[in-house]
Amino acid sequence: MSAANVNHALEAAGHHAMERLGIDPHGRHAAAARAHAKQAGRQLAVAGYKREDASPHITENPPLHDDHEAGYFDGENARFAIKFSGADGLDAAGLDACLQARAAFDQAVHEADADAVQVVMDTIFRIATKYPGGIVAFFDDVPEVEDLRRAAVAWRTATDAHDAARAAAVARQAEWEASLPSATELMRAVAAEANGEGTSFDFQGYTLWHEPDHGGWSLTNAYGVDHCRFLTSERDFQQLIDTVRRRQDIGPVPPGCEIPDEPVEDDSYIDAMTACYEAETALLARLGLSADAPVLDAV
């Protein structure tokens, strides 16, 4: 059953009944009853109901009252917090996502399912990256979640910075491309300035030398290699402009002068992902679970 569709009050009563009947040698039903009672309280508060609206499954089982009350208080605090959230803070949709994540987490722990715990941690990671200025509600009792949240926010910060730098570079590229002359304009400017034997015209790192005997201009590239191309027509000048726009080279490039590949990740990005991995690993170890699959598959 999906964690989102569970009747937590009913589940709490059911596990409590198993505990009272003594069908709980390892205390798993007692723990599950407490977890479901808390979640029922959270749901009640998040939905905007009063304590008096609690399900009969809770009210008729006094041992569940304290945990239900603790969950309700947890939900009330979370609702209060989102009212005063600033930019990038948790909103109602994020609060609901946290509520569902907590239900899935409790279910995964009850079933001792390491893979399911990892799925929840991936979900928490996504919540934290979507709301970097907010809390991850309902996980105050799971310290590893705060470690994961901080790492996720660091990842989001590094990613945003990388994206902003890339966007700025794209904008500069577009502005620079718009400043390039047309083939007609460039040919006219070259003909006016490089007009006669030995005269030249510089364009974006290239030098065009007039060779009147051959009816055009020879090209020296940015590395000082002469006679890389010979231009005589607007079509030739358009090809030069297109090559410049694509950031390509004309003629041979000396060894060691190639443009290096842009790094995909910087240290802050890698550090954040390492911290996320460590948070998941620490939680699984504390729960006594082992995971064979790689963590953070959703990133």
Image (spheres, rainbow, N blue to C red):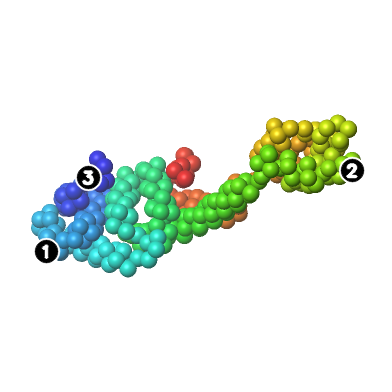
Q: Residue at x 47, y 58 (%)?
A: 153
The structure residue drawn at horizontal position 72% and vertical position 36%, both measured from the top left corner, is 237
* Badge number at residue 16: none
Of circles 3 and 2, which is in front? 2
Of callouts 3 and 1, which one flags the residue occurring earlier in the amino acid sequence? Answer: 3
Q: Give the camera-side residue of 18 and 78.
A: 78
Tell me how far mark 3 sits from mark 1, CA to CA: 22 Å
**Which element is circle 3 on?**
helix
The residue beneath circle 3 is 5
Residue located at (68% from left, 39% from top): 184
Task: Say which amino acid is labelled 3.
Answer: Asn
Q: Is residue 231 visible?
A: yes
The spot of residue 194 in percent (x, y) is 82, 44
Q: Badges 3 and 1: C-beta atoms under 8 Å apart?
A: no
Write down the residue under mark 2: 198
213 up-or-down from 259: above or below? above
Q: CA distance from mark 2 to mark 1?
A: 95 Å
| Residue 123 as seen in the image, left or right of residue 96 | right
Residue at image coords 17%, 53%: 9
Judge the density around disc 2: few (<14), some (14-19), many (≥20) Cα neighbours within 10 Å.
few
Q: Mark 2 falls on what kind of element?
A: loop
Q: Does 46 appear above or below 21? A: below
14 or 224: nearer the viewer: 224
For the N terminus, the quadrant is top left
Kind of residue indicated by mark 2: Gly
Decide which of 149, 216 is in the foreground and name it: 216
Q: Find disc 1 in the rendering and name its residue.
A: 52
